[in-house]
Image: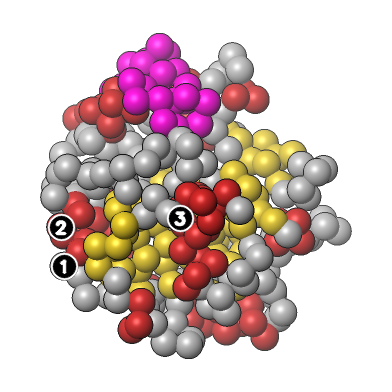
Amino acid sequence: MRAMRKGQELTPVADRTRQIGPDDILLFCTFRNEDVRLPFFLDYYRKLGISHFLLVDNDSNDGGRDFAQAQPDVSLWTTKGAYGDARYGVDWLTYLQGKYADGHWALTVDVDEFFVYPFCDTRPIRALADWLDASAVRSFGAMLLDMYPKGPVGDTTYERGADPFQTANWFDPGNYILSRNKLLNNLWIQGGPRARNFFATKPKQAPALNKIPFVKWRKPYAYVSSTHMMLPRGLNLVYDQQGGEKTSGILLHAKFLNTFSARAEEEAVRGEHYRAGQEYKTYAERHGTDPDLWCQWSEQYINWRQLEILGLMSKGNWA
């Protein structure tokens, strides 16, 4: 009901939803002032096999809305509504998912998140969806993996349309803790470079890294908190309850580029993110907004097979 109300805040800019075919895989995303990221983001997911993008622009003023509007495979809505009041954009997307995604596989990501799944270098996302359908699996989990450069984040140079992982290509291979939410049955994962750099003295306040980005959508479904957990609760069981391995993926998180400093300072003041922007305020308090996240245990990214060997994702029984 909250999503239905928040959906009234959306104004269509380019509605191409009539182009959506019955078997199309859809991507949902909210963005604000991401013109520098949008070209690579759309290109990455087109190559992965996304058929149609349903995007919500949260009052951008940098040209990103105009760029998205001109894309032939994008349907775009805009809103001046408060990001925090819409549960960080989730309510807007839940409204659109209920209207357009019923019966479709839907991928819900941020504009700095890049989906990696087993065999993604040789198999399109349709192959993953077909295998999940054949296995009677409704939801697919992925851990958010913070990527960062070697050296201060501010020393990087990111140009519009470039691959962010040419620069931010290091990650923490370990340093992760898991717990289980008994109420909703989802896993809660924390750790990585943000935990060790900004939340070392208060690890329980570190950002959550567990995500459920890929779902065979039905109208009653809803995300509860970002894409960390869902209703109905059964959609949260993206892990093997008997202690084995279940097929899972990774979301490469391209947050830490030279664009980070200005964005972090802005969001700390806006206070529209979780806990009134406390995460961004912590960045400034601890190490400023130009951190050096690299350490002697950092590992340079190669491919999904490397992540599976490290135990960060699994191909499970998908051969």
Q: CA distance from mark 1 to mark 3?
A: 23 Å
> Is residue 300 covered in magenta?
no
Quadrant where the C terminus lies?
bottom right
Q: Are marks 1 and 2 in contact (CB under 8 Å)?
A: yes
Q: Nearer the viewer, residue 264 or 100?
A: 100
Is residue 79 in view? yes
**Earlier-in-chain disc, 3 versus 2:** 3
- Image coordinates for residue 64, horizontal then vertical, percent: 19, 52
> Mark 2 belongs to which amino acid?
Asp
Residue located 59% across and 44% down the image: 225
Crowding near pointer 2: few (<14 within 10 Å), some, many (20+)? some
Figure quadrant of residue 114: bottom left
Q: Which mark is residue 66?
A: 2
Relative horizontal placement of residue 231, taking residue 290 as reference (left or right): right
Measure the C-alpha gap from mark 1 to mark 2: 6 Å
Can residue 228 be seen here? The reply is no
At horizontal 82% and vertical 57% (from top left) the residue drawn is: 241
At horizontal 20% and vertical 64% (from top left) the residue drawn is: 69
Nearer mark to the viewer, of 3 and 2: 3
Q: Which residues are magenta?
A: 268-292
**Which of these two is toward me, 221 or 303?**
221
Q: What residue is disc 3 on? A: 7
Which residue is more in the foreground, 223 or 188?
223
Q: Amino acid at mark 3?
A: Gly
Tell me the element at label 3.
helix
Question: Which residue lies under the disc numbered 1?
Answer: 70
